[in-house]
Image: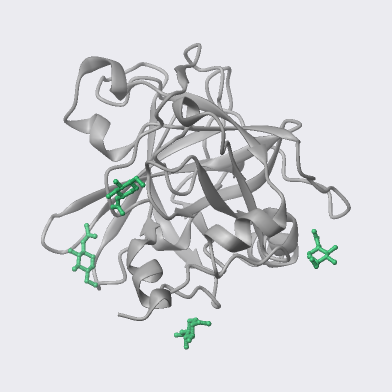
Amino acid sequence: MPPVLILLTLLLPLGAGADEIIGGHKVKPHSRPYMAFVESVDIQGNKRYCGGFLVQDNFVLTAAHCRNSSLHSSMTVTLGANNIEAKEDTQQIIPVAKAIPHPDYNDTVFSSDIMLLKLGRKAKRNKAVKPLKLPEPSDQVKPGDVCHVAGWGKTSINATEGSSRLREVQLIIQEDKKCKKRFPHYTNTTEICAGDWKKKKTFYEGDSGGPLVCDNKAHGVVAYTKNWTISSGVFTKVVYFLPWISSNMKHL
Ligand SMILES: *[C@@H]1O[C@H](CO)[C@@H](O)[C@H](O)[C@H]1NC(C)=O
Ligand SMILES: *[C@@H]1O[C@H](CO)[C@@H](O)[C@H](O)[C@H]1NC(C)=O
Ligand SMILES: *[C@@H]1O[C@H](CO)[C@@H](O)[C@H](O)[C@H]1NC(C)=O
Ligand SMILES: *[C@@H]1O[C@H](CO)[C@@H](O)[C@H](O)[C@H]1NC(C)=O
């Protein structure tokens, strides 16, 4: 196989495999009130889990690869959760009325890997459920900036008690050059690359669709990594997609 193809086969969409924040820590319950747990069920009843985040009372942002393109698949969003395996009073389980993946989403290279979910009803805002701010058009992250990613992760569903809780890991914005080497399709106009090359202990395994939070704003959406033993990954750059996000939220 030519090297490029080998690399491509190593690209793991984070929603497809075993996703779990690793090397991070549990967060104080409900301290990340924007976090959404996204469940997708296809026509055969197969389930798939992703992260996402509330951006308006009736809109959740996630990754496009979290959608099952088969007909009659359905999605639900759980807000206000800490332990996703428990029935918590704070949880709001809301069906998705409409999934709007970005029209340029490319499932080979995971470009434009972003999707809006219009909720069937508005979320009720409270201490456990609150939207996350989107960045301003002029906001930028730069190498060295410290950000966070939270998630539950697919493997946690059938795993030990602890991993069913929301976890978070700290990641650092990386230099474009380094990322380009590791991720051949990485492009700095539409993507952000973050991780920690030195500390193997703090790598994370995934949670597609979850937010990369820098300065209390959603700068990125977890898109892909090459190999979950490597402590870095690529995020869809929210700033670039702001016009698409706001026009879709306005017109739906
Ligand atoms: C999603 O769709 C594909 C076919 O497009 C199918 O192979 C897969 O099993 C489906 N289900 C899930 C949960 O991803
Ligand atoms: C996805 O991107 C690859 C690489 O740029 C390109 O070869 C392919 O045609 C694209 N696929 C679609 C469906 O646009
Ligand atoms: C992207 O990379 C190019 C070339 O390396 C650089 O000139 C440009 O400033 C970068 N853009 C952003 C938004 O980081
Ligand atoms: C990921 O990387 C590790 C260490 O480099 C390697 O042992 C492992 O086989 C890789 N896994 C995949 C799925 O590529």
Q: In this view, does 80 lie above or below 105?
A: above
Q: Is residue 246 visible?
A: no
Q: Is residue 216 left or right of residue 159?
A: right
Q: Which colour scheme is used?
A: one colour
* Residue 116 % position (x, y): 53, 58
At 51% from the left and 73% from the top, the residue drawn is 105
Which quadrant of the rendered structure holds the N terminus? bottom left
**Which residue, as the protein is rendered here, is positioned at the far left?**
44
Q: Residue at position x 37%, y 76% from top?
A: 5
How far across and down, in percent of the image, does residue 43 sit? 16, 64
The answer to which image quadrant residue 217 occupies is: top right
105 or 204: nearer the viewer: 204
State the residue in front, 157 or 169: 169
The residue sitting at 42% across, 19% down in the picture is 90
- Residue in the image at 55% along x and 46% along y: 58
Q: Residue furthest right?
A: 138
Instruction: State the quadrant of the C terminus.
Output: bottom right
Foreground residue among 151 and 2: 2
Q: Above or below — where is 211 with respect to 108?
A: above
Q: Which of the two residues, 49 or 91, is positioned nearer the viewer here?
A: 49
Residue 59 in the image: x percent, y percent? 56, 49
Q: In which quarter of the image is residue 3?
A: bottom left
Q: Where is residue 27 in the image (x, y as percent from the top left)?
A: 49, 16
**Above or below, 37 relative to 103:** above
131 vs 199, left or right, is: right
